[in-house]
Amino acid sequence: MLFAGVDAGGTATRAAVHTASGERAGYGTAGGGNPAAHGPAAAGEAIAAALRLAIHGLPPDSVTASVAGVAGSDEGFAAVLCRIWAEQGLTHSPRLVSDVDVAYAAGTHAPSGTLLLAGTGAAAARFTAREIDGVADGLGWLLGDEGGGFWIGRAGVRAVVRDLDRGSDGGPLVELVTRRFAVAGPPRRRADQIVRMAQADRMALAASAPLVGQAAELGDPLAREIVREAAERLVASAVRVHRDGPVVLAGSVLTSEGPVRRAVLGLLEEQDPARAVRGVAGVVTARDAAGAASWLAALERLGEDAAVRAHPRFTC
């Protein structure tokens, strides 16, 4: 038996095929597969490209179950996936779940626990019996996603233009952001240029998030304050939904080494009973989400005990 899994997000799509023991048999990557961000047609093309690479050279009729975790999908997108699977010669249509489901499974096999996700966006989700039964934030870049990459990048760029507006050349954060936006001239002129560029392409703000971490490491007080606030907002979302079990950290902001991850870990692993987040049975980091989607497909066929034993191999 072979099992296929897909993790489709806004910037990249990954597909994996595994044996029943968890050994990886195929893997493929492609561009963004979020239908809300790219449209159903383009998202479908990306998913098809990744899946085609993953199953190359494998007998399609050996794939007995599939799970596709797709960000920004709705029930109508299931028909697109069914068509893609049929075109690739796969006889079993995939089960469509959210990217949140596969992100949680990428960190743990525990049926119940909490996912804290911070990539471009941010959300926390409580799982019970592997079903989502509580969500905090995930309200999008304009009104929510507090502590995520867009929020961090926007806060950093906002702090820089305000500093420049006051006529200050600032410190490391100002230097990094002005270099990133390739602006020059007097402080106010640089601020105006950055504002125009950010208004023309809001994703330039999300791309600025790593600069905040770099500046914080260099001791910039503005950046350090943003990092502190981002971590507190993320953990506050987790606290709102968490009951028991592990907390899984997922998304580039929390899986990459850096000051935000360290600050979040510090808050979650606080030893002082008066300040600790209650009920946390360990903090783990999500690994390969496409492999986790493949594991969710295997779970349906292998049963709980065998699937739990194989989980580390699926997600490595």
Image (cartoon, grey):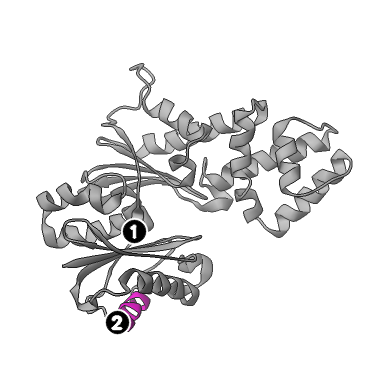
Q: Nearer the viewer, residue 154 or 56?
A: 56
> Which of the 4 image quadrants contains residue 14?
bottom left
Where is residue 207? Give x, y as percent.
61, 50
Q: Which of 130 and 237 is in front in this view?
A: 130
Residue that protrudes farthest toward the front in the picture: 57
Where is residue 2? Give x, y as percent.
20, 67
Residue 45, placed above or below residue 131? below
Q: Residue at x 56, y 32 (%)?
A: 227
Where is residue 237? Give x, y as percent.
42, 38
Dot 2 corresponds to which residue? 86
Residue 46, placed above or below residue 210? below
Q: Residue at x 45, y 50 (%)?
A: 138
- Label 2 SS: helix
Q: Which of marks 1 and 2 is nearer the N terminus?
A: 2
Residue 139 visible in this rendered orientation of the protein: yes
Dot 1 corresponds to which residue? 290
- Label 1 SS: helix
Type of residue at label 1?
Ala
Based on the picture, tell me whether residue 297 belongs to the magenta stretch. Answer: no
Tell me the CA gap for discs 1 and 2: 20 Å
Q: Which residue is drawn at 85% across and 33% down?
A: 167
Type of residue at label 2?
Ala
Q: Is the magenta stretch mostly helix, strand or loop?
A: helix
Residue stretch rendered in magenta on the structure: 79-88
Q: Are marks 1 and 2 in contact (CB under 8 Å)?
A: no
